[in-house]
Image (tube, helix red, strand yellow):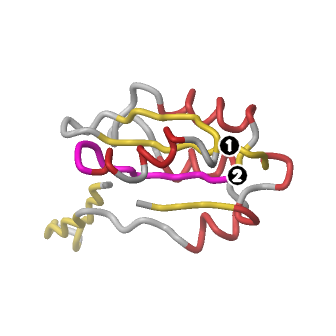
Amino acid sequence: MKVYFGGQIGENRRGKLAVVVMQDGTGRYTPHLNGMHSKEFFHLTGAMNTKKIPVRVYIGVSQDAGEHLVELTANGNAQTVDLREVDQAVVIPLFVDRNQEKPNRIVLESTLDGYSATVEPR
């Protein structure tokens, strides 16, 4: 899980809302847009963690930015949604680049000319 908040959010994308992107057991993403101090936000980042895994939390986003994050992740999964690109939509580049995700696996295979590497994303 990555959490972006406050000054990490681009200045023109800041507000009083939070987006929590959850991932279920099948890998499907479900985004939730709520107030930062709402009961729903605390439920998603607390008790709901036992059923779904939060993969991204953006705290302090505007309505427009939150709706855009929802649009980018709704009904997607790890194979169809690049979360780094989603991060870039609202987070200052310095913080996106600082926290790059490591791939699950890097496969190195011998070829006639040397080696070939395949990176399997999260």
- The residue that appears at 47% across and 35% down in the rendered structure is 31
Residue matched to label 2: 60
Q: Is residue 41 magenta?
A: no
Asked if 29 appears above or below 36 in the picture, the reply is above
Left or right side of 31 for 86 = right
Magenta part mainly helix, strand or loop?
strand
Q: Amino acid at mark 2?
A: Gly
Please state the horizontal and vertical placement of residue 57, each as a whole percent of the image: 52, 52
Q: Which residue is mark 1?
A: 17
Q: Earlier in the sequence, mark 1 or mark 2?
A: 1
| Residue 104 horizontal side relative to residue 55, left or right | left
The secondary structure type at the circle numbered 2 is strand
Query: Could you tell me if the residues under marks 1 and 2 are in contact, i.e. CB atoms within 8 Å?
Result: yes
**Residue at image x 57%, y 34%?**
33
Q: What amino acid type is highlighted by mark number 1?
A: Leu
**Residue shown at 24%/50% (left/top)?**
50
The magenta-colored residue range is 50-59
Foreground pick, 48 / 10: 48
Residue at point 46%, 45% (across, down): 82
Q: Position of residue 86 (x, y in %)?
A: 57, 45
Query: At numbered mark 1, what does the secondary structure look like: helix, strand or loop?
Result: strand
Please identify the quadrant where the C terminus is shown. bottom left
